[in-house]
Structure formats: structure tokens, C-alpha cells
Amino acid sequence: MSKLRFTIDGKPCTAEPGQTIAEAAKANAVYIPTLCHYEGLPPVGSCRVCTVRSGGRYMASCTQVVTDGMAIENMVPDLEDMRRAIIEMLFVEGNHMCPTCEKSGNCQLQALAYRYQILVPRFPFQFPGRHIEAVAPKILLEHNRCIQCLRCVRSVQTKDGRKVFAQRDRSKKRKIDVDAKLAAGLTDEEVRKAMDICPVGSILMKEIGFAVPIGERKFDREPIGSDIEKGPER
Ligand code: FES
């Protein structure tokens, strides 16, 4: 099947049939911020940070596939401000203390806040009363930082396909639960992977901290999105 042709902010792009806007944008060296999306996992379109507009319609670029002739708006002021507002809401809704967080420098929420130059959110801080769960032998679950992206629920499974994390309750009470027995069977490498899949510092591996010093971590070295904007290496 021939490639689809479309534009992002006027830039001519091509896509494979069935590719989502986020995937195709990345392949065309265009950065669209994402948060709940993780390459290789089925997208859920829950955070809406990746919202773009085409033909006056707003859509989550991680779930919407490209159609031929689309003219997509991405880095336009109102969409950028909407993304900034979502990131601000995520900050005020939880308790994020970046300077003391093990994930600082590797945290996508923090990296997006830097990209959007967020200093003081426009919304009041909620300071919710949340706890830290240490029931799993190797995992610390920090509910204060959880942004409910469900990446862990979608990805962390035992060898026989049972989910280690699940979602409990609804609305403001909604939280992520870990099955301590199943989590006990995870190897160190699997726990490390779960920690990496979490975009914030909500899933932490016990007994290991600050192995890579702050200042030398992924987003300390390179701002989020810059690898995509540089395009594939030749
Ligand atoms: Fe698309 Fe979250 S990254 S909705």
C-alpha cells in the first residue's frame, strides 16, 4: 500500500497506513509531547497531553491514525497552552517534590514542566493525603506521584500473563494497586523495567537509590523531545 501524505504545522509528512499521528510525527522528526503513551504498549489516550487538531477537531495523537491529506496543527499557541495546563493540573493534583525524588532527571512529567517553563501552576495545589506502599518485597509504590497513566497496568505481567498492577476505585479515590505476591516473583530486571516504564517516580526499586547522580540523568543531558526533533541519525 502506498504511503499517506499529510502535514503537521505545514510541514509535508508521510505515514504508513494504520500509523497513529504520534508515531508518524516521530518518524518525520516532529515532536508531539506524550505522557501516558509508551511505545509498544496499546495506547489508551488518557492524559491528552498529545492533543492535536485537524479540520477543527481535537484528537489524541497517540490513538488517532493518520488519514491521507490531513492538515494537523501541533505547535500552535492554544494547543501548547492546553498542554501546559494539563501538566500544571497533574502537578497540583499530586504531591511532587522533585528535588528529593529518585526519578528527578528521568521523570517525563518534570521534563515536560521544564520544556513548558512551568514555574507556578495557575491552579491551586490540592495537597492530597496519599501514602507510600511498601508491601511488595522489591517495589515501593509512591502514590503521591502517580499520574494514573496506567502504563504499569498495561505492561507489567508475570511469565504466565497475570497483571502485577491494577486500577482500584474510581474518581478521586482511584489508585494503582500492586499484587504483592505476584510482584515478589519479578526478577530484578523486571522490577527495573517497571520503574523505567513509570513516567514519574511512582514505582521505585527498593534498596537502590541515586545510583546515577542527579545532573547526569537522561533529561539532565538532553531536554525531552530534542532527540525526536533532531531526526534519525544518518
Ligand atoms: Fe496521548 Fe496521553 S499520550 S493521551
Image (spheres, rainbow, N blue to C red):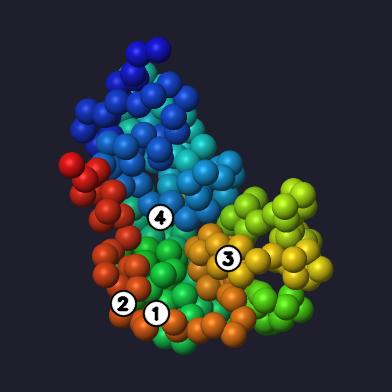
Dot 4 or dot 1: first in sequence order is: 4
Between 108 and 87, the one lying in front of the other is 108
**Res 26 quadrant in image:** top left
Q: Which residue is mark 2?
A: 216
Q: Which residue is mark 3?
A: 189
Q: Amino acid at mark 3?
A: Glu
Q: CA distance from mark 4 to mark 1?
A: 30 Å
Question: Does ligand 1 reach within 8 Å of label 1's beta carbon?
Answer: no
- Name the residue type under label 1: Val
Asked whether the beta carbons under mark 3 and mark 2 sit within 8 Å of each other, the answer is no
Please say if the residues under marks 3 and 1 sit with CB atoms less than 8 Å apart: no
| Residue 212: assigned label | 1
Quadrant location of the C terminus in the rendered image? top left
Q: Is the residue under label 4 in contact with that under label 2 (CB below 8 Å)?
A: no
Query: Which structural element holds mark 1?
Result: loop
Q: CA distance from mark 2 to mark 1?
A: 7 Å
Foreground label between 4 and 3: 3
| Side of 160 where 103 appears, left or right | left
Count residues near mark 2 (Cα–Cα under 10 Å), then give few for <14, some for 14-19, many for 20+. Answer: few
What mark, if any, has residue 83 been given in the picture?
A: 4
Location of the N terminus (image quadrant):
top left
Marks 3 and 1, the one that precedes in the sequence: 3
